[in-house]
Image: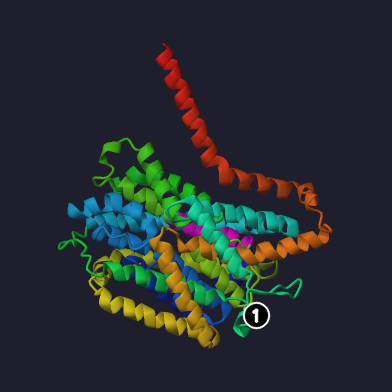
Amino acid sequence: MEAMFQGLGLILDPFNFFLIFCGVLIGVIVGALPGLSSPMAVALLLPFTIGLDPIPAIAMLSALYCAGTFGGSITAILINAPGAPPAVATAFDGYPMAKRGEAGRALGMAAVSSVAGGIFSLIVFLVATPLLAKAALTFRPPEYFALAVFALSMLASISGKSAVRNLIAGAAGVLISTVGIHLTTGVERFTFGIIDLTDGIHFVPVLIGLFAVGELLNQSQALNVAYERITSIVVRLPSRADFLKVRWTILRSSILGTFIGILPAEGSTVAAIMGYNEAKRWSKNKEEFGHGAIEGIAGPEAANNAAAGGAMVPTLALGIPGSGTTAVILVALIMHGFRPGPYLMNQTPHFIYAIFGAMMIANMMFFVLGLAGAKVFARITLIPRTLLWPSVFVFSMIGAYSFSSSLFDVWVMLVSGIVGFLMLRHGFGPAPLVMGLILGQLVEESLSQSMIMFDNNWFQFFDSPIVVMFFVLTLLGLFWSPVTGVLGKLFARSNARLKGGD
């Protein structure tokens, strides 16, 4: 209890409160801009938090994460241009409502549903993180290796056009993480005589390059695309009848989104799509979906913001990122000297409560901003891309250089940007590569330590029930869909033959 009051007291400091407000404001603006994303914004802001104390720095990034998830719904509703991937599902019914002159009703429902989902997931976060961290204290290197392998297998569904592409990108991230001197053996790998590579490739320049510069190059192909804009917005908030209609949809989506968020590598986009599908499946008015159903906004918005809070649970308790943005936040934790995982809760519990308080305050703030500033934020989309993206490039250069005052990091950022552009062009999402880069070090170190413990006897991995469980989950995650698809085709052929015989 003392740690809780200490953590919440730190967040209520006026300066920290101001930083949380700045994070929320930046998050809503970034989320509202088509093409910009929370991972990119957090990656760009990361170098500028180096001079801050750890708690205000992580609190600001966490607030940006929460608000950025909601901000994407603003442009999704107003101009049918989702500002963030999770907002794609919101656009299905939000934009038709806006075309009917009910943009205020749609934005109000999005704000209320987002806050409800966010607060629900934060309560679960507060309860589940200590329990999960306590269980993780029993983990040895073999268990961490199996957990990391399971997390890598979850990359199949994180983003991009196919599971195979995602796994390839994740494997590439693991390979990049091996550059430099191996801590256990002292052997240099893939340095090619370049001194700057002996310490490995830093996270921050790669993140900025993949998300910011890669998206910049991708957006440069669509400079002349014009979005349909709604000229008159009727600001009428949802009625009491609307809230009564969607109360069970919000609760269902909040539970679903929190669960999806806790799963490593799933993230808000998967939660939003599933939230929309479940809202439609349970609705009594399925024919309204796609034409302006209020439940079609409440479902995905509650789910994607619940996933944001849920994704922080494995990030803090296990050191396993729950989404692309929490992967960047995990880098920030390491950069500020924290050790994500069970020891974080054991040694600095007040830090967990401080993040909880920051995210709770952020939810309240973006609720007010979302209702009061919708018209203002909508006008941000009028900024010409010829001005917007050069500004992003300048900030990318500054952010990459300021991390360690190294020009080599700028080159890493530029190369990563080209790689990110090529990945997007060929259907490879950048998020799996980032997750592989983050998890690669954990996989390598835990495997090396395990082999030393087992005297190079692989079979001793199977002496641990936890390791066996994670290996089984990994196999199910990788092969469940293909196997069920093949079985489905076989059953269909058998039924067709039986009908033909009749």
The quarter of the picture where residue 392 lies is: bottom left
Q: Which residue is drawn at 56% across and 71% down?
A: 331
**Is residue 310 shown in magenta?**
yes
The reply, left or right, for residue 341 in relation to residue 312 is right
The quarter of the picture where residue 174 lies is: bottom right
Q: Which stretch is magenta?
A: 305-318
Residue 32 or residue 344, whichever sits in front? 32
Quadrant location, the C terminus: top left
402 above or below 36? below
**Is residue 75 shown in magenta?**
no
Q: x, y (%) of residue 480?
A: 55, 40
The amino acid sitting under disc 1 is Thr
The reply, left or right, for residue 260 in relation to residue 41 is right
Q: Name the residue under label 1.
A: 198
Residue 472 visible in the shown view:
yes
Quadrant location, the N terminus: bottom right
Q: x, y (%) of residue 3?
A: 64, 69
Q: Residue at x 26, y 77 (%)?
A: 386
Residue 86 or residue 101, whichever sits in front? 86
Q: Is the magenta stretch mostly helix, strand or loop?
A: helix
Element at badge 1?
loop
